[in-house]
Image (cartoon, rainbow, N blue to C red):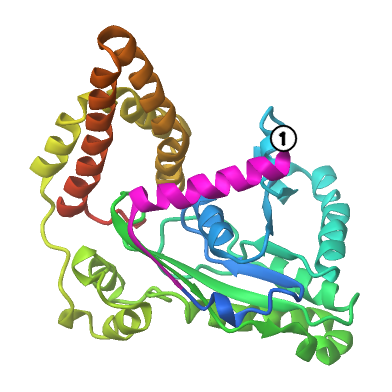
Amino acid sequence: MKRLFYHLVAGLVRVTNGFMFSRVEVRGMDRVPWDEPCIVSPNHQNAFLDALLVGVFAPDTLTFLSRASVFGTPFDWVFDALHMAPIYRRRDGLDKVAQNKDILADQREKLTQGGSVVMFSETEHAHTYYLRPLSRGSARLALNTQDETDREVQLVPVGINYYHLRRPGFKVSIVVGEPISVSTYMDRYRDAEAECMNELRDDLADAMRDCLLVPEKTDEYRERVDRINRKNEHLSFPDMKRALQTPEDLEPKGPNRPTLEALARGINLLNVVPLWGTRVLMRWVDEPAFTASLKFAVGMFGLPLWWTGLFAVTSWLGGVTIGTGVTALAVLTILLYIILIRYANPPHVLPS
């Protein structure tokens, strides 16, 4: 049952991608020897949406190491079916952190058998385009695993580049960098464990920056982020990364058009319940990094359920022809909503 649920969710993610993003560019997956133990390290901007995107495009089934605070609820069956495992942090209490020893031992066992694990190396998710400081967690897991196996452990850098961090209708580029072969660090690791761990972490950070459009926060950071917009989506990741070295040569985002955003909301009376529910969820969570993830979840589960109910009620009231027409109109107005939001040029909202 869990296997079936996993593939069902993966299928829904692929379908929802077609609504959520104008284009999904995936580069470099073929660089990775997926039959070897792989520790995948993406940047972390958008809560569980980051994990969904990496998981659905990887040719291997991945295990996701996630913050433990989301576990211990009625959704634990779902998390287990999606191959999620908890990782405790100091804020969870030292007694909880001690449980990481057994959890990571289980993950090392899976890795030595050729499995793949996703571990977000940035300590938290946040709406920044540049790479934030990395913890040593991925490096430690990679070195400890390599110490227990003769197989070639790979540390895989990944960059997720959203052309808008909060709104639907824009491009996303998922870029896989050159895998780091951990075995080449083992002599240094046995001589100076801590120093080698820091070295591998720093090498991973450099490799992840190569996978990001805006790898660092510089004086031109906001100008470069402004150029990450729909007018420049035609450029491939390598071309866009090069062009951002001189951002003045790229098309600017242009002014926000709030009238188009108002029109997008106004035409969606047939979808007012799921749209209203999304806004309630965002106010309840009140964490910007969950904005796109919540919208994606509503698009993946909420809208299909809503349209099914809408079809059932309108068919009961007016017949199947009326029900089909009303439901089709609801779907079309959502698509038009996304197009209008795209051309409204919503501003990038960046932390100060």
Give the x, y percent position of residue 118.
66, 62
The segment highlighted magenta reads 1-26
Position of 312 compared to 233: left or right?
right
Quadrant including the N terminus: top right
Q: Is residue 266 above or below residue 36?
A: above
Q: Main secondary structure of the magenta part?
A: helix
> Which image quadrant for residue 121?
bottom right
> Which image quadrant for residue 55?
bottom right
Q: Is residue 342 above or below residue 172?
A: above
Of 225 and 148, nearer the camera is 148
Quadrant including the C terminus: bottom left
Q: Which residue is mark 1?
A: 77
The kind of residue tagged 1 is Trp
Residue at image coords 14%, 36%: 262
Examine the structure image and report whether residue 19 is included in the region drawn in magenta: yes
Of 322 and 86, nearer the camera is 322
Position of 27 compared to 156: left or right?
left
Q: Is residue 166 visible?
A: no
